[in-house]
Amino acid sequence: MPAKKTLAMLVGSAMLLGSSQLMATPTASMLADTCAGCHGTDGVSTGPAGPTIAGKSAAYLSDVLKAYKEGTRHSTIMQRIAKGYTDEEIDLIAGHYAGLKWVSMAGEQKFDSAKIAQGEKLYGKNCGKCHDENGALADDDAGLLAGQWLPYLQYTMADFIGGRSEMPKKMAKKVKKLSDDEIEALLQFFASQK
């Protein structure tokens, strides 16, 4: 085989090998960049329909993304997006966002102070055991509720109540006893936390 042809084959093979290795190992940051359109830069949501995901626990984020992937948690688009990732990539994304700072959206919203006061009382009786520190503790694996956008919390609760997303059994027992007005008061309380 002529030397030029051999050299061309070696160079071509090296280029293919190099590009396939680059494509095979995306970083957590690269994977997470795709989330910015809906969840904001660095996971801080700028729109009321999408939650802030920065600062949530890695275990919680991973579980939620895998539930979307499996179709056991309802969404408008996340089920389709999550199916595009391997479980390992989901874990990388979850770890990336868990390492970022939580930012409350409470200051960006308007609330009914009477509902917040009612919600605080209901929280103490119904939610405090699972949603520690007024819903602000990331490590309780129940999700950060404090300071989320109120419309997002309302949509998510509607999905739970409507059976589109699986509600934890303990939560279902508590929610079943609450009126629509009481649920709204609880959601306003959570969303108002800074």
Image (cartoon, rainbow, N blue to C red):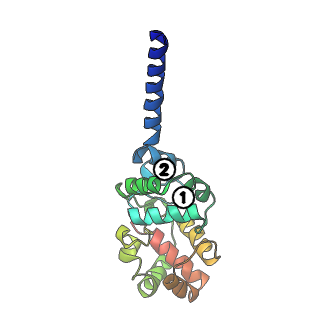
Q: Which residue bears the numbered disc 1?
A: 50
Label 2 – label 1 distance at C-alpha: 9 Å
Q: Is residue 149 visible?
A: no
Q: Which mark is residue 176?
A: none
127 vs 22: above or below: below
Q: Secondary structure at mark 1?
A: loop
36 vs 98: above or below: above
Q: Secondary structure at mark 2?
A: loop
Q: Residue at x 41, y 61 (%)?
A: 104
Q: Quadrant of the C terminus?
A: bottom left
Q: Which residue bears the numbered disc 2?
A: 40
Q: Residue at x 35, y 75 (%)?
A: 133
* Callout 1 amino acid: Gly
Residue 168 x %, y % = 51, 79
- Check contact, mark 2 vs mark 1: CB within 8 A: yes
Task: Depth check: give the residue in front, 193 or 43.
Answer: 43
Task: Depth check: give the residue in front, 26 or 118.
Answer: 26
Q: Residue at x 57, y 73 (%)?
A: 157
Q: Is 175 on the left-hand or right-hand side of 193?
A: right
Residue 99 x %, y % = 34, 55
Q: Is residue 80 visible?
A: yes
Q: Residues within 10 Å of mark 1 (few under 14, many from 20)?
A: many
Q: Quadrant of residue 123?
A: bottom left
Residue 138 x %, y % = 37, 67
* Callout 2 amino acid: Gly
Task: Depth check: give the residue in front, 119 or 84.
Answer: 84
Q: Residues within 10 Å of mark 2 (few under 14, many from 20)?
A: some
Residue 79 x %, y % = 60, 59
